[in-house]
Amino acid sequence: MLQYDDSAAAFVALSFVTIYIVPSWYNIIKKFKVALFSSDEEIGAISRTTAEKEKAAKLKKTSKGLKTLNSPWFLANLVITILLTVLFIWLFLSVQSNGEVNSFDPFHILDIDTGADMKEIKKAYKKMSLKFHPDKNPNNPQAEATFMMVAKAYEALTDPTAKENYEKYGNPDGKQSLAVSIGLPEFLLNVDNRNFVLLSYLIIMVGVIPMAVWSYYSNSSKFGEKDVMYDSYAWFHHNLNEHILIKSLPEVLSGSAEFRERNMTKTVEGKQEIGKILVKAKPHMQKPQ
């Protein structure tokens, strides 16, 4: 009989958490290494002239030091990774202390010591069967499942054939081809948590998954062949022709859609600086045809 298994759920959760935190910590450590220990050559801050020294100094300022890690996405990922690492440690300790996926143990099910006598077995069975009887727990699938397991455990300890099967094969029903349990926590069967489980399922199926699909589609639909944005293709088609001069190529490339948002400064000082550069560069810019 399939049953929800907290131990198996811990194994499943541990696997999914590991899938996230291993590459995440690799990426975080890599960013810290670049910010704190990267050389000038690695970030391209090599200078030979006075003008290049000024550019190299600006590049070092923006590419090295802890302030380069002060981005919302990096900090959010760092917090999430730390929290999931704490969860990983807790799950690991839980698996280590109760690492085996549940096997049939009638003494554990009846909450008695291994090797208990028949008097204790009958007393425990009577107590638990009354507690988890379906008539006393209507509309409670967890109590019903527990009641059936209690009856099966009592049979394994009292019926000669069932007891022989349990001692020989570990199951009162005899040799089993495959022991399977569901890797989900048992609290999902609790009737008190029914509304919470249904609400979580609704949020994931109606909210999270459609939002993730929409976000992926809306982002991927902007890109064409070789991951070049369609807006960039249109820009190149409009500006590139057989008459273009080599000195105009940086201007054309800087207008690519991939760089537009990155090149747009949001500070007043940055806008003023761009305005000054534009005044100087405007006479040399390519004229519309």
Image: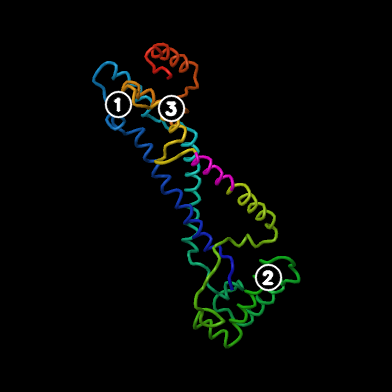
User: Along the polypeptide, which appears first: circle 1 or circle 2?
Assistant: 1
Q: Position of residue 13 (x, y in %)?
A: 51, 56
The circle on residue 144 is 2
- Circle 1 or circle 2, nearest the eye: 1
Residue sitting at 52 percent across and 43 percent down?
Answer: 217
52 or 14: nearer the eye? 52
Q: Residue 53: say if magenta.
A: no
Q: CA distance from mark 3 to mark 1?
A: 34 Å
Q: How is the image coloured?
A: rainbow
Q: Is residue 93 above or below residue 132?
A: above
Principal secondary structure, stretch drawn in magenta: helix
Q: What segment carries the magenta color?
A: 210-221
Q: Is residue 90 above or below residue 260?
A: below
Q: Which residue is mark 3?
A: 238
Using residue 177 as the reference point, say whether residue 119 is left or right of it: right
- Per the image, label 1 sits on a secondary structure element best described as loop
